[in-house]
Image (cartoon, rainbow, N blue to C red):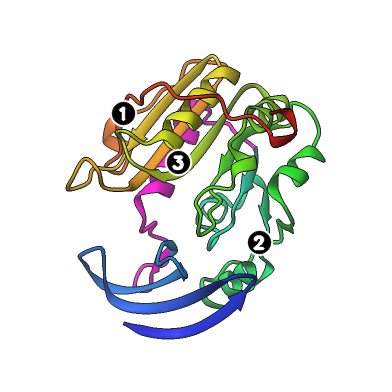
């Protein structure tokens, strides 16, 4: 594994590596990684248009399956820009709090679109018009996990206000499928704002292992084809508590 660049931004490090293997798959890969060793995005240097990681493939399928004619998307968390770059003809607004992440995505991962706004995703979402978006995607991480203020009832109700009648919110999270109080709370809180909710998980070796979990909320029934979910399968989470904005507690 070869380190191409390491940058310090705020309280964490951002690194770009090249490797001949990624998650057991042999090839030629370049990936962006935070200081907690979580890979935020990856490209196949031999086939740059191929989407390497499972979760963006699953998210793209959910979007295309539930609204093939979608046009407007608000995304919180840029990474290397895999999802907006997959549909350059669609209108994406991408909120990214760390300008250094965007700089590295342009320098090392061929991101060329001019649709990234630097700042807090919730604040930037507040500035958007009502009923403007077909999808809102949450893909934001810190070393402590998904920022709390992006998981509360207030945030989910804000997102609902910015979605059109057929719109959905899609969350990419990291957690456990059993006995995970935070994951259960996020799922329960989302369910308090949306009539329909589904949860999907990647498989893991042990039940207690942390893995990618996708949660979808919508005001209409959520459809998917399990063969197109890149290994994600539907699960049920336990009921948790409602996450409220701090000022409301």
Query: Disc 2 versus disc 3: distance between alpha carbons?
Result: 20 Å
Magenta stretch in the rendered image? 42-71
SS under mark 3: helix
Callout in the foreground (2, 3) = 3
Whether residue 52 is in magenta: the answer is: yes
Q: Where 249 sits versus 75, above or below?
A: above
Classify 10 Å Cα crowding around label 3: few (below 14), some (14-19), many (20 and above). Answer: many
Give the residue displayed 38% in from the left and 40% down from the top. Answer: 213
Q: Which residue does the numbered mark 3 point to in the structure image? A: 59
Q: Which residue does the numbered mark 1 point to in the structure image? A: 234
Left or right, 220 with respect to 94, comes to: left
Left or right, 96 with respect to 229, comes to: right
Name the quadrant of the C terminus.
top right
Marks 2 and 3, the one that precedes in the sequence: 3
Residue 90 visible? The answer is no
SS under mark 2: loop
Q: Position of residue 152 (x, y in %)?
A: 62, 32
Query: Disc 3 versus disc 1: distance between alpha carbons?
Result: 13 Å
Q: Which residue does the numbered mark 2 point to in the structure image? A: 113
């Amino acid at each position: 594994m070869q380190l191409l660049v390491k940058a310090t931004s705020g309280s964490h490090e951002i690194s770009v590596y090249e490797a001949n293997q990624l998650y057991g798959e042999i090839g030629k890969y370049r990936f962006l990684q935070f200081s907690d060793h979580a890979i935020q995005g990856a490209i196949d240097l031999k086939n740059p248009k191929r989407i390497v990681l499972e979760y963006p493939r699953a998210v793209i399928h959910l979007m295309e399956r539930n609204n093939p004619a979608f046009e407007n998307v608000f995304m919180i968390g840029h990474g290397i820009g895999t999802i907006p770059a997959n549909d350059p003809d669609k209108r994406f607004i991408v909120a990214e709090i760390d300008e250094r992440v965007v700089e590295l995505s342009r320098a090392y991962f061929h991101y060329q679109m001019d649709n990234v706004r630097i700042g807090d995703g919730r604040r930037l979402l507040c500035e958007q018009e009502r009923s403007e978006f077909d999808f809102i995607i949450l893909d934001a991480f810190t070393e402590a996990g998904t920022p709390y203020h992006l998981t509360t009832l207030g945030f989910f109700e804000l997102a609902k206000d910015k979605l059109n009648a057929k719109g959905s919110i899609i969350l990419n999270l990291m957690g456990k499928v059993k006995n995970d109080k935070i994951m259960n709370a996020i799922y329960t809180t989302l369910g308090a704002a949306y009539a329909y909710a589904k949860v999907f998980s990647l498989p893991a070796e042990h039940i207690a292992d942390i893995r990618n979990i996708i949660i979808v909320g919508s005001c209409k029934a959520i459809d998917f084809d399990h063969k197109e979910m890149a290994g994600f399968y539907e699960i049920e989470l336990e009921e948790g508590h409602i996450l409220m904005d701090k000022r409301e507690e």
